[in-house]
Image: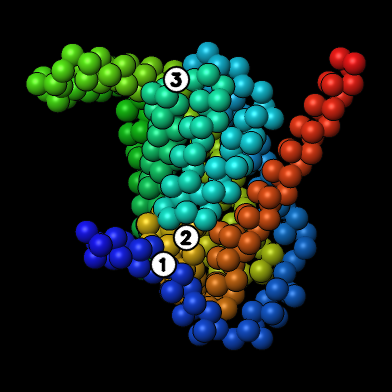
Amino acid sequence: MNNRASWQKWVRVLGIALLVWLLSQMSWKQIWQAILALNPAYLAGYLGSFLLMTLVRTIRLHRVAAQLGYLIPLRKCSKAILEPALIGMVTPGRIGEFSRVGYFLAEGMPLATAVSLVTLERLIDLSLLLVFGLGGLTYILAPNPDPWLSAAIIGPGLGLILGAFRGYGYLTRGLQSLLRLFFRRKSSLATRIGSAWEESALRVLKNTGLVLFSLGLVCLLLNFLQVYLLAGAFGFQADRLVVVFAYTSSALVSLLPVSVGGLGTREATYITILHRQGIRKEQALLFSLLDGFVLSLAMIAFTLGLVWLLHSIFRKKRGSRRT
């Protein structure tokens, strides 16, 4: 048992070890030159699109909670987005995102509903990333890249996700059969618990699935815009679609539980893909660190601080009115 725990501990830092090795192979002079050469206008656009994406995610959370009968103020929704995202950046596989369950519980949402909602949100976001990632790999690896071929993969993939929501009735019957099989020899208490979780999951899927999908798609497209603008800040002369699709591949790889917040694995993916486009490895490394960690962490901390400040001002004003 101890050997297994030790092995799992070392696996979690493989990405960090990879990042340290990558940094040791870089020319720090070229990295510094790349920083000084960043275009501030494109960089400002990147930061603006990040804020817009955060706003859309906040509105999505507010909408789906309302669909389930819970009117959570936008300022609380923004904290429920930003704080778990901050935890996710320092946990393997971004598992910290599931801490969002605690925010729903604080608003009176039952545990089964809160877990079902956060799980469905993560599954939909992952499904969108997988669909675009598959289409992106087709474009990146093809001898003659064709965006229409990628579209031919992405389009049906999105259709399959939508079809899963439309056909939730079939899914319901399948889940019911599985649960009956699983709880057939269980106690009546276990059966009631299983039924409660089943009802919560299906209610969440029915009422929030399409909203999570549509606004999740908007968030992913805004992520693509961020990557496109950051590539502009670097002045990359490479195919911008390759750079955008490199984001999907690196984001998927960063979810592997072999690093903290995907550090190391994400950088290795970016370097591998962008170097094929003639981009120097120092630029690719800096690009990955800025997009996946430095700027994201800074913007999350800045936005969270702003939310806390506005919330404090709001509470003081409300307290002064009462007195």
Residue pointed to by mark 3: 110
Mark 1 and mark 3 in contact? Answer it, CB < 8 Å. no
Q: Quadrant of residue 136?
A: bottom left
Give whichever of discs 1 and 2 has the lower sequence position: 1
Residue sticking out furthest to the left: 185
Mark 1 and mark 2 in contact? Answer it, CB < 8 Å. yes
Which kind of residue does numbered mark 3 sit on? Answer: Pro
Q: Quadrant of the C terminus?
A: top right
How far apart marks 1 and 3 lie (CA) works out to 35 Å
105 versus 16 height, above or below: above
Q: Is residue 61 visible?
A: yes
* Horizontal and vertical percent position of residue 49: 67, 47
The label number, if any, that marks residue 215 in the structure image: none
Q: Is residue 140 visible?
A: no
Residue pointed to by mark 1: 13
How far apart marks 1 and 2 lie (CA) works out to 7 Å
* Horizontal and vertical percent position of residue 120: 40, 32
Which kind of residue does numbered mark 1 sit on? Answer: Val
Residue sticking out furthest to the front: 2
* Horizontal and vertical percent position of residue 265: 43, 66
Q: Callout 3: helix, strand or loop? A: loop
Which kind of residue does numbered mark 2 sit on? Answer: Val
Image point (46%, 50%), residue name: 94
Residue pointed to by mark 2: 260
Camera-nearest residue between 35 and 265 = 265
Left or right: 277 as drawn, with respect to 255: right
Camera-nearest residue between 250 and 150 = 250
